Amino acid sequence: ELHFMKKIPSGAEASNVLVGELDFLHQPLVAFVRLTPAVLLSGMTEVPIPTRFLFVLLGPGGKAHQYHEIGRSMATTMTDEVFHDVAYKAKDRADLVAGIDEFLDQVTVLPPGEWDPSIRIEPPKNVPSQEKRKMPGALDESSSHSKPEKHSGPELERTGRLFGGLVLDVKRKAPWFWSDFRDGLSLQCLASFLFLYCACMSPVITFGGLLGEATHGHISAMESLLGASMTGVVYSLFAGQPLTILGSTGPVLVFEKILYKFCKGLVLLLLHRKGESPWAWGSVCSPLSTKLLNLVFAGRGNRFCPNIQVVFYWNILNFGDFIEQVGAFPGKWLFSMTDLAPRPSIPPRYPGFPPCPDALFLQECRSLHGEFQGPACGRNGPYAPNVLFWCCILFFSTFVLSSLLKKFKTSRYFPTRVRSTVSDFAVFLTIVIMVLIDLGIGIPSPKLHVPHMFK
């Protein structure tokens, strides 16, 4: 045992294969167990090394030889270097099955009638490297000499008919259309729905607020939400890509801002000059109805990324008004109210401050629709301290809490189903928890105003 132990490298872990028969079983029971961390099971292995994997096969009586051969096959599979990586990183049964299929594709099998088992095969002098098998999409030697495939798929082949490719695409997806809805009726899909809801709503509302500021309320969050919902529903139903996030982006914001300035300079109504929509519809349908779609690649959209970054960086540098407000922030903490009838009967509530006309409480000033003035006041009232620091805390806390809940699946607390459910709803639970904390603390963090009705 000591002589054998010296030949085993440090840090080695064992895989135990256990097979057996039980009279009360009516069908085989198979389990592949990965222990975290590895556990030293005394009496299981020939040498005292920790066990990482357990393969257990139990079945009804009368088939002991078959169970033994299955155990031998599984032990041979565990000696493969590539299957090691699959077993360590597998998250479900499908990953293990894929690893076994890959091993069977690469294994060399000798037929029993063509080889004498008493003759031993000498081991190779140089063991071939298995790095090529670990590369994603690696091809074997038999397929490497095959004819290269075309870049375009069958949906991009020319049909000779107007919108022929679109019609064929709909026909190909029609048999699986209703099954997609049936497959979505699961708890894990519900977690994806909630995550996509937050992922789609966040950019739409954010860019909607920016559009409202750029167009002075002509196009705001409600219009962006309506447009994104309509296009998202149509795209998800017919494009076959329900996980794609659609909504307003940087180029849309820049275009609408330029169009608003153009209409304002020429004294034109913005919503009456929205003639670019038919042009956009025509530019999309033209390649869709012809063979020009083959010339459109997904990589073309990446060319807009540098332009978007330049525009956003330019807007960041144009913070002249903000810098002036910050520079005047340490000034006098005063707020006054104008455009209201004088109320001489109200005594001054802030005797320490210099006298200001109609000094009222903040709530009274807002209820009377007063206007805040002074270097220490903003649009909605006096500046609140610690808002920026609190927003940073919310940002980092959301990221940390979401990561912890996502890793909760691999922890050792609660049953497996509970841990899996919490991990699936990690992002949504994090958002709900942090929103409740923000409301409970009471610090006036910036929030986007969304109208209650569409008008």
Image: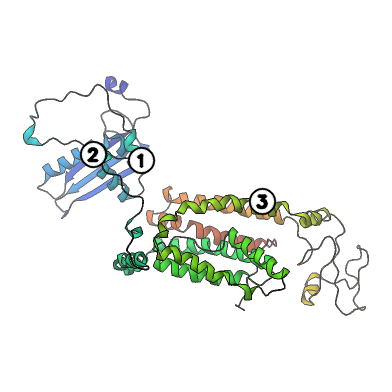
Quadrant position of residue 339: bottom right
Please, what secondary structure does the residue beneath circle 3 have?
helix
Residue 41 in view here: no
Residue 134 in view here: yes
Q: Any mark on residue 194, and which? A: none
**Which color mode does the image show?**
rainbow
Image quadrant where one finds the N terminus: top left
Task: Write down the residue under mark 3.
Answer: 313
Q: Are marks 3 and 1 in contact (CB under 8 Å)?
A: no
Of marks 2 and 3, which one's residue comes earlier in the chain? 2
Left or right of residue 324: residue 421: left
**381 vs 300: above or below:** below
Distance from label 3 to label 1 (Cα)? 44 Å
**84 vs 10: above or below:** below
What residue do we see at 9% from left, 47% from top? 62
What residue do we see at 30% from left, 64% from top? 172
Q: Amino acid at mark 2?
A: Ser
Q: Any mark on residue 88, and which? A: 1
Of marks 3 and 1, which one's residue comes earlier in the chain? 1
Left or right of residue 425: residue 321: right
Observer-nearest of 402 and 52: 402
Of marks 2 and 1, which one's residue comes earlier in the chain? 1
Task: Write down the residue under mark 2.
Answer: 142
